[in-house]
Image (cartoon, rainbow, N blue to C red):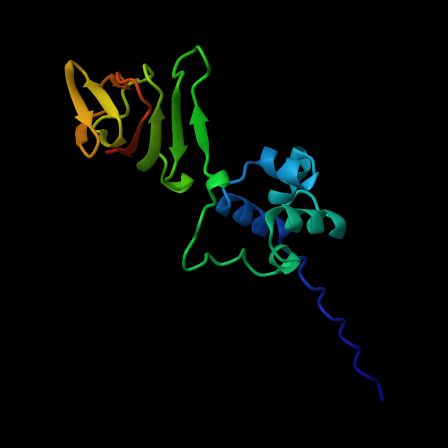
């Protein structure tokens, strides 16, 4: 009497570290460079892990979890990347910020990117801070684009094409941004505003 061959167990699927790593990094607003610095893992290795071209060691996964401030299990799960929380928060230090080069174009301008990256090119919003005399000079955006500028503190001059307006704190300007436009701080103090860009 012959016996049936014993079926071999199907190997478990290896953890999808790359997908989880990319999701956690993007959620925290971290660049590959920043995560590389925090974790002590090369940028090229991080890129290969996220693209599933490299299998990290447990030691590397542990360093990544420590750098991201998450449990090791969040990176070793074999299902999908972590589900988004009901309330997604971004720490102040993790908010991307653009600054003009000192003495160059945009000098004295600071833009904190408040909108999520996946909406870029559709709906963007920023916290804008201009030092006295600073000018944020912009080329035309796509056809139909508009900007909404609300001054929180100080005073700002707005130019859209051939038209100009001056805004005090609490005032808002809405204008076509598919033409050359600029925002300037003519006052003696720093000015702060919220800038929303709507792309058609």
Give the answer, above or below, for where 102 lies relative to 46.
Answer: above
**In the foreground, 33 or 46:** 33
Instruction: Pick the residue in front: 196 or 76.
Output: 196
Residue 140 percent location from the top left of the image: 27, 20
- Identify whether 153 is placed above or below 63: above
User: What residue sits 84% from the left and 85% below the top?
Assistant: 2
User: Which quarter shows the N terminus?
Assistant: bottom right
From this viewpoint, which residue is outermost toward the bottom? 1
Q: Quadrant of residue 33?
A: top right
Query: In front here: 130 or 77?
Result: 130
Image coordinates for residue 152, horizontal then vertical, percent: 26, 34
In the picture, measured across the screen, residue 64 lies left or right of residue 27, that is: right
Residue 19 image point, x, y percent = 57, 50
Compared across the picture, whether 99 is left or right of 65 comes to left
The C terminus lies in quadrant: top left
- Camera-side residue of 132 and 95: 132
Image-based side of 168 in relation to 8, left or right: left
Determine the residue positioned at 46% across, 56% down.
84
Q: Examine the rendering and report whether any part of residue 124 can be seen.
A: yes
Q: Residue at x 20, y 34 (%)?
A: 170
Identify the residue at horizontal 40%, vertical 35% (top origin). Answer: 113
């Amino acid at each position: 009497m012959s016996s049936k061959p014993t079926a071999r167990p199907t190997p478990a699927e290896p953890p999808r570290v790359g997908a989880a790593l990319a999701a956690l990094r993007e959620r925290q607003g971290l660049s590959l460079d920043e995560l590389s610095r925090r974790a002590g893992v090369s940028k090229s290795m991080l890129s290969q892990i996220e693209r599933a071209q490299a299998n990290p060691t447990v030691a590397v996964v542990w360093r990544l979890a420590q750098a991201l401030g998450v449990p090791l299990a969040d990176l070793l799960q074999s299902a999908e990347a972590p589900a988004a929380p009901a309330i997604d928060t971004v720490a102040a230090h993790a908010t991307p910020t653009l600054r003009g080069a000192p003495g160059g174009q945009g000098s004295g301008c600071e833009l904190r990117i408040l909108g999520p990256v996946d909406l870029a090119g559709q709906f963007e919003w920023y916290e804008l801070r201009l030092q006295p005399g600073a000018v944020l000079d912009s080329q035309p955006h796509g056809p139909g684009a508009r900007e909404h500028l609300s001054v929180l503190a100080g005073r700002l001059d707005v130019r859209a094409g051939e038209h100009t307006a001056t805004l005090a704190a609490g005032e808002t300007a809405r204008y076509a941004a598919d033409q050359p436009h600029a925002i300037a701080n003519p006052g003696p103090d720093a000015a702060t505003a919220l800038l929303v860009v709507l792309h058609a």
